[in-house]
Image (cartoon, rainbow, N blue to C red):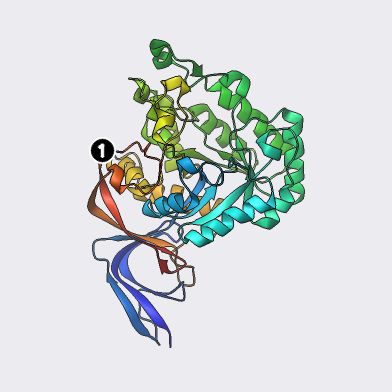
Amino acid sequence: MMRYLHIENARVIDPHSQTDTVTDVFVANGIIQAIGHRPAAGEIETSINASGQWLIPGLIDLGGHLPEPGYSQKGSIASETRAAINGGFTHICSLPNTKPVADTSAVIKLILDKAATAGNAKVLPLGAMTQGLAGEQLASMYTLFEAGAVAMSNARQPIRDSYVVRRLMEYAATYDIPLFLSANDLSLAADGCMHEGPVATRMGLPGIPATAETIALAQLLLLIEQTGVRAHISQISCRRSVSMLRQARESGINVTADTPLANLLYTEDAVTGYNSLYNVQPPLRSERDRQALLEAVASGELAISSNHHPHELSAKKAPFSDAESGMSQYDHFFSHALTLVHKDELSVDALLRATSTLPAHILGINQTLIEGSDFNAVLFDPEGDTLITASTLTSRGHNHPALGKTLKGRISRVFVEGQQLL
């Protein structure tokens, strides 16, 4: 006899199925069996009164740093995937800059095994495009793909020249392997640590011009067009990149892209005071850039990634230009992102599309709240408040931008393939 989890009176919000209604959901064997009506057979095993709460598809991250293997002082797969659950993620793409680098099937399998043992968010490894992420010799991408990597990335590490980029794309296109590409001209970025502009000049900090991103993006788009590779541009940060991507799509180039949450929440002004928490890559740019990114998210052109990068306290205690870049973002991610909704800068629908529906489409995952789908979902209380303190963080990285603040909304439950993990 079928035994059901019954979620009562939830506001079901799902951009994929264009659903926004208060209804009941019945789940059994990890699958949504019925919505809005009780199944003909079976019995209710567990009931959850979700009155006043949202039932939304689980979030999917297109790029976060897991410090294991190799950087145990920054966290583990277990700690960071648990933090991801606390932020509303059911699936996360892990970048390949581990130690050793995820450029062999053994490392990919180790990551998958540790993630399965932890039993938190599902980890979707990104394999290294080049051996050791050195940007010179191609990694055995097909072997990594077969081992379980969902796509290949060089994790913002530079690739030697355009000839190597072309070879990478041609190899990936041959086997229909997706590439997650970063647009960053290292010679222009040089030793910069923040956006090149008036704030950097006033503070005496070396800047990273927007052209470091846009010149590299132009090269990538031309080679994507030439090779026909399945490509995703990771973590764009400036207004011109948005218009370049739009023009590329209009000309028939099939390319997707995301932007980090930090670049939607903050600008270069956050660096005032030399707060190393805001030393991130890509850098926080101007308000004009932020507004362009928000418009692209609202129109469905951009996904939102976490760019989660946990650090121990000492890594952020150095002077701004010497501090390690990155923010810890997994804990309370959805509540943090929802501040954009509270400020009327995004709609709930646009936020969910950018953090769940579009990432699912990019990865070929079925992440939707319709009958017959895997139950990967989040129950969220929009009226709950959460004070972010060191004790509420699951990630070992306490370099969280909302530390000490109260966020509106609280995740009450997370389900991965029907299993309640929170």
How many numbered callouts?
Answer: 1
Residue 316 lies left or right of residue 50; in this view the side is right
Nearer-the-camera pick, 19 or 47: 47
Residue 149 visible in the displayed image: no
Residue 296 visible in the displayed image: yes
Q: Quadrant of the C terminus?
A: bottom left
Figure quadrant of residue 343: top left
Residue 363 against residue 130 in the figure, above or below: below
**Residue ID at (59%, 31%):** 183
Q: Quadrant of the N terminus?
A: bottom left
Residue 226 x/y as whole percent = 74, 37
Residue 73 x/y as whole percent = 46, 40
> Which residue, given by chain and number where applicable, does mark 1 sit on?
404
Three-letter code, disc 1: Gly
**Residue ID at (30%, 38%):** 403
**Residue ID at (54%, 30%):** 241
Nearer-the-camera pick, 158 or 360: 158
Residue 143 x/y as whole percent = 73, 52
Secondary structure at numbered mark 1 = loop
Residue 105 against residue 139 in the figure, above or below: below
Nearer-the-camera pick, 8 or 3: 3
- Other residues around mark 1 within 10 Å, as few (<14) / some (14–19) / many (≥20): few
Residue 41 lies left or right of residue 303; in this view the side is left
Nearer-the-camera pick, 207 or 244: 207
Residue 379 x/y as whole percent = 33, 61
**Residue ID at (67%, 56%):** 147
